[in-house]
Amino acid sequence: MLTYMIRRLLLAIPALLFTSLVIFLLVDFAPGSPMSQIPLTVPPDVRARIVEALGANEPIHLRFGLWLYQFFVVEPAYLLDQMFGTTLSTGRQRILSWQSRSPVMDIIAERLPQTLTVIGLAYVIGVLIALPIGIYSAYRPYSWFDQIGTFVAMVGFSVPTFLTGVVLIVVFSVNLGWLPSVYDTRLRMTGWNSFVQQAGQMAMPVMVLALFNAAEISRYMRSSMLDTLGQDYVRTARATGIGERAVVLKHALRNALIPVVTVIALGVPTVFAGAIVTEQVFRVNGLGALLINALEASDLPMVQTLTFIFAVLIVLFNLIADILYGILDPRIRYD
Amino acid sequence: MKLKTALMGAVACFAMAPAAFAERGADGNVKVLYSQAVSIMNAYLSSGTKDVEAGSLVLEPLAGFNEAGDVIPRLVTEIPSVENGGISEDLTTITWKLIPGLLWSDGTPVTADDAVFTYEYCTHPEGGCAQAARYEGIASVEAVDPATVKITFDGPKPNPFTAFVGATSPILQKAQFANCLGAAAPTCTEANFNPIGTGPFVVTDFKVNDVVEMAANPNYRDPAKPAFATLTLKGGGDAAGAARAVMETGEFDYAWNTQINPELQAQMEAGGKGKFVNAFGTLVERIEMNMTDPSADLPEGERATAKHPHPILSDLNVRKALSMAIDRQLLVDVGYGAAGRATCNLVPAPEIYASPNTDCIAQDMEGAKALLEQAGWTDSDGDGIREKDGKKFTLLYQTSVNAVRQDFQALIKGWWNELGVEVELKAIDGGVYFGGDPGSPDTFQKFYADVEMYANNFDGTDPEPYLAQYTCEKAPRPETQWQGENINRFCDPAYDAMVVELAQTRDMEARGALARKMNEVLTKDTYVVVPLVDRGRLSAHSNTLGGVVLNTWDSELWNASDWFRVK
């Protein structure tokens, strides 16, 4: 198992390097320029000097080389400095955002907690809702419960979050006035009151995303469970007379979970990537909002760094999904 | 309108008189929502309006503009003029006197050295200063004594109120930014996020592209202001959401630039929690006529250059007919409502520079048709499209992707179709259209279309640099990497001569007359630029926020020190 993991991780390195090049080229060749953010009142010669100061007019290979150096050498060195008080990164330029002229990594670190709490919680809640619904729907297929579950899943899956989000705002913020429509990042949880406030402002984005996540996973769970319940060994288990509860939850569920766990694990990187639309609608300052904002402003260093981190996470969670698969299914061995 | 705004300002002043005697910080927290989040507080490193305006709460220039566009003192005792000796007779120097005893928010004195340093900071060749244009034409800035700043210009400067005037040209503290000159400017993250200033507020927490927390400046020059102890400036989302947060849910006190369609405006006003305020500046949505041939048949490098005049639009009568067919009032009603008004001028304000021309307001479809007939464009084959010498009258009409602009395109296409003109529409992503990439065929400067639409304005109250954009040499062309401000490639030696004349004219009346004439040359005399809508600024504030006076000449938050809570 260990050699397998090491082999996979080593193989990931060239793949990620190649990915970073592809991302860099894509972002660079994409139309749009940081100049589009400068008002027309700024004369052309001043614009030219601004672009020069950003380093945006350097040849592409130099910029890519610099980014690689900054990402793989300067940023880790800075991290070590922060942790152990060394001076490895002194005098070396970190990756700077073109928009705010501040280190990209600091901004990402500032944004990560919101994304993890809001989007992560939505994911967890989505999974917790989806599994029981999927299991019971499969146990009683085509019952009224299954029909409703299917309908809700269809709605959750096909109605876009920008619509559900705005509908929720209109209902709960505008008409009822119960929940805030704008996420307040400054809120510190210090006691019961602020906890209620935090729960209130997280309620709507979490609801929107949980519905969306639950819809997808409950369908996977249902079909996988349906498959398993039809297997011969389930009939055998029933024949031993151990009771329906044990048959479904012990014998069938464990096997039915194998593909579902993979799907859930592969979905985790999307938690980090944030929910671009939902974050924008509720003004949650997470990574998704950061990415879309950087794209609009053609803030290439920010877009490049963020997408690359997402790529790393996807590779990592693919590996984790494979390993989980091996743990859950004894037939699979990686040695 | 301006009188009305001024009167409203005066009324607001009287209404707030009791509050004005309140002590600093008595009114708690005020929440401001910008639909674009703030990236940086230093206006010299970002030209984005949101950044400049957020910065204006902390960093101040020597003088600013009020809602009427007049220069008002901020850090100085009075506005220099030739009469009070502040401006030399030959208009080559201007001398500012700082208010005695003025302190930075950290308690150290503000001196003339700070202004001199600010000049050095922005004019450093490697700094990439976004506001370098404010410091153009300056020979030197010196500190005569700790309270006196003297600016010497290269030559006579009829409008000396560029450097250190307005939110785009604030004073930085030398002590804080001394190590941030030139290439080091972007590395000073701490200073750029938490600048020490003289404004009513100081930054207490800065979250990039999200929220800025501010508190009242303990050393603000007026001991009774600001009324609010803290200010929260949240950013992000969209204009409609921002308006909703003020007008319908009441979560915020002020929303910036809530440009939404008239229908939604009315719906939100019904929310009853706030009101919209609007004011007009110089932003004009216009159609630009291409005077050169953008045909794809021409070799690259000659396409859309002065070598090939436009086969259709070179005729004045054709351009005029296209303008006459447009119903500008309908465009306003559809797209902007209270935040727009029909205009025929490229320079719609200030009053002294605005031409009284209103010829274009009334739509005249029959007149337009007659003009085209007269110009030789007739529909001889009865297919509804006019021809001349076997060439069909077809136009490519481009603009950026934007809901209002696409509405405008559809309406104008309808009118031009009625005129017998075939119109092809094209909408380009704003990042590309305004991106200026010489390699892209879709930038507005390259103008590979017959007509195009966008909005532009000028910084401050003096239109001289704006009108000077239309000289022959400023046409974008391959030799200039397609950079240049004379988008139409309009070229008239007589106009170029007027540009030179305007730069040398000192008398305000004469400047006004000349600028009005130049505006007319570009619009009603030649129809090279076809103005459509004078786009005002529309913002929203809650009913409990008092003292708001919308100002389009300076930062919108220009008088945040006067804001108070209506009780």
Image (cartoon, grey):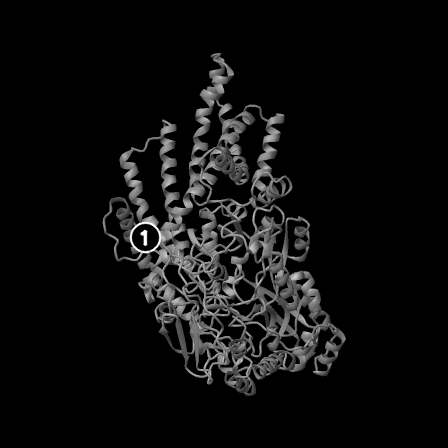
Whether residue A142 appears in this view of the structure is no
Q: Does B190 appear above or below B515?
A: above
Amino acid tagged 1: Phe
Q: Position of residue A130 (x, y in %)?
A: 52, 31
Label 1 resides on the chain identified as A
Give the image quarter of residue B414.
Answer: bottom right
Q: Residue at x 29, y 44 (%)?
A: A10
Residue at the right extreme of this rendering: B366
Q: Position of residue A35 (x, y in %)?
A: 45, 65
* Callout 1: SS: helix
Badge 1: residue crowd in 10 Å (few <14, some 14–19, many ≥20) = some
Q: Position of residue A301 (x, y in %)?
A: 38, 56
Q: Does A138 appear above or below B324?
A: above
Q: Position of residue B483 (x, y in %)?
A: 47, 74
The N terminus of chain A appears in which quarter of the rendering? top left
The residue under label 1 is A71
> How many discs mark residues in the rendered view?
1
**Left or right: residue B374 compared with residue A103:** right
Could you say which is closer to the camera, residue B197 or residue B497?
Answer: B197
The C terminus of chain A appears in which quarter of the rendering? top left
Whether residue B146 appears in this view of the structure is yes
Could you say which is closer to the camera, residue B74 or residue B336?
Answer: B74
Could you say which is closer to the camera, residue B363 or residue B518?
Answer: B518
Q: Residue at x 27, y 44 (%)?
A: A83
Could you say which is closer to the camera, residue B193 or residue B287?
Answer: B193
Residue at the top extreme of this rendering: A241
